[in-house]
Amino acid sequence: MSMDDLKTSRRGFLMSSAAAGGALLAAGTARAEGADPLITEVQDWASGLGDGVDATPYGMPIEFEADVVRRNVPWLTADPISSINFTPIHALDGTITPQGCAFERHHSGAIELRKEDYRLMINGLVDKPLVFAYADLERFPRENHVYFCECAANTGMEWAGAQLNGAQFTHGMIHNMEYSGVPLRTLLEEAGMDAAGDLSDKWVYVEGADASSNGRSIPMEKALDDVLVAFKANGEALRKEHGYPVRLVVPGWEGNMWVKWLRRIEITDHAVESREETSKYTDTLADGTSRKWTWVMDAKSVVTSPSPQSPITHGPGPLVITGLAWSGHGAITGVDVSIDGGANWQKARLAKPGAKMALTRFYLDIDWDGSEMLLQSRAHDETGYVQPTKAQLREVRGLNSVYHNNCIQTWHVNTDGSAENVEVS
Ligand SMILES: Nc1nc2c(c(=O)[nH]1)N[C@H]1C(S)=C(S)[C@@H](COP(=O)(O)O)O[C@H]1N2
Ligand SMILES: [Mo]
């Protein structure tokens, strides 16, 4: 058999098997009717050599994925130092956020702090004030946990109406990582808490080494429960922008309490009422009074695709609808998806059973008829709580709020597959 014969017969085999693939991939089948050079021709990448193993000692995503990056909305803040950027949730799948595209929120910029220069002080109502060097922290028994971190301002621009056109911008102040660290409880016990007496009315005040210090008061009950002093995320050292070398992880509670570049922990008999827990991160109600101590992030979800930055690029037929759900009160137990603006709901498939205070990935696999959709998702958590509509939230909270907006999001999907942010309240 000549080389040409071989090529012809191979091509024949591939084409017929592609055709046998059948209805599911209609567009692919149509293309296979002509000779597809990607199948029939020897390609450059198959006729030379690739990079050697030493080309990239620490790998970056391939250039074709250059779009999957954090993005800033410049008009939101006066400058990029005290600012926020957003995780490209519209382009990710699964639940773990790679550190390199996990949102950042700084009040005075991301500082560079060497492990050698790192000190963590525990003082206040302790038996013996202590200072830990980084290497000291590594000698305490460690735990691993996956948790989401959501800024309380996530979705905050959407109170008055549909505002930012993309899931990255409406819901991207969130990341979800596997942390390795020492329970805060262990370090507090090392310092001794007899001096504090009755712990039930005590607090810990935590602050960072950056100029903003971002001080927050945490009730002792939470401090002794599941708070972690973390130094690794997704297996590797924290990135500078996420608090290298050590940050606080406060599961289920608003991102502001997750103090980065953690410098000091003070046991107190009162809440400090710092800037970050009075003039900021409180919710002004309709009557002008404010809610405070709104620590827990309520259950929430969003369809990440299709969405404005992730339009449908194929015609009618099989369509994967997917998104994320989470709750600061525990595990997600279910997610409903509506394609008609909340008139009818279908149960989505959870990729894995919900885990406490961690992102849950959901899918709804539909046969799209090509007509317009008003896409929504609605989360349920283990407490029985159901994610509210925008109207329900406004009824309780009024229109003055910024933080803690966990309402149902709507994407209007057009017949051409493009999508936009709309309000269905
Ligand atoms: N020291 C310090 N910790 C901080 C902040 C800060 O500016 N300085 N920002 C807080 C806020 S408002 C949020 S939402 C989270 C964001 O964490 P990230 O930058 O890892 O996404 O960190 C919190 N911890
Ligand atoms: Mo935040």
Image: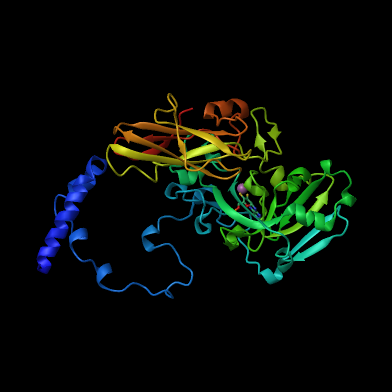
| The N terminus, quarter of image | bottom left
Instruction: Give left or right: position of 132 versus 324.
Output: right
Instruction: Give left or right: position of 339 versus 157.
Output: left
Name the residue located 23 percent from the left edge and 40 percent from the top edge: 23
> Picture coordinates of residue 357 (x, y %)?
61, 43
- State the count of labels: 0
Q: By what rule are the colours in the image chosen?
A: rainbow
Res 322 quadrant in image: top left
> Picture coordinates of residue 213 (x, y %)?
70, 56
Q: Nearer the viewer, residue 51 or 274?
A: 51
**Where 125 sits versus 2, above or below?**
above
Q: Residue furthest front?
A: 1
> Picture coordinates of residue 328 (x, y %)?
62, 40
Q: Is residue 400 visible?
A: yes
Instruction: Give left or right: position of 397 versus 1.
Output: right
Res 237 quadrant in image: bottom right
**Where 230 sits versus 337, above or below?**
below
> Picture coordinates of residue 107 (x, y %)?
63, 54
Res 79 quadrant in image: bottom right
Name the residue located 20 percent from the left edge and 50 percent from the top edge: 17
Q: Nearer the viewer, residue 86 or 379?
A: 379
Q: Is residue 378 visible?
A: no
Name the residue located 62 percent from the left edge and 27 percent from the top edge: 396
**Where 55 sits versus 95, above or below?**
below
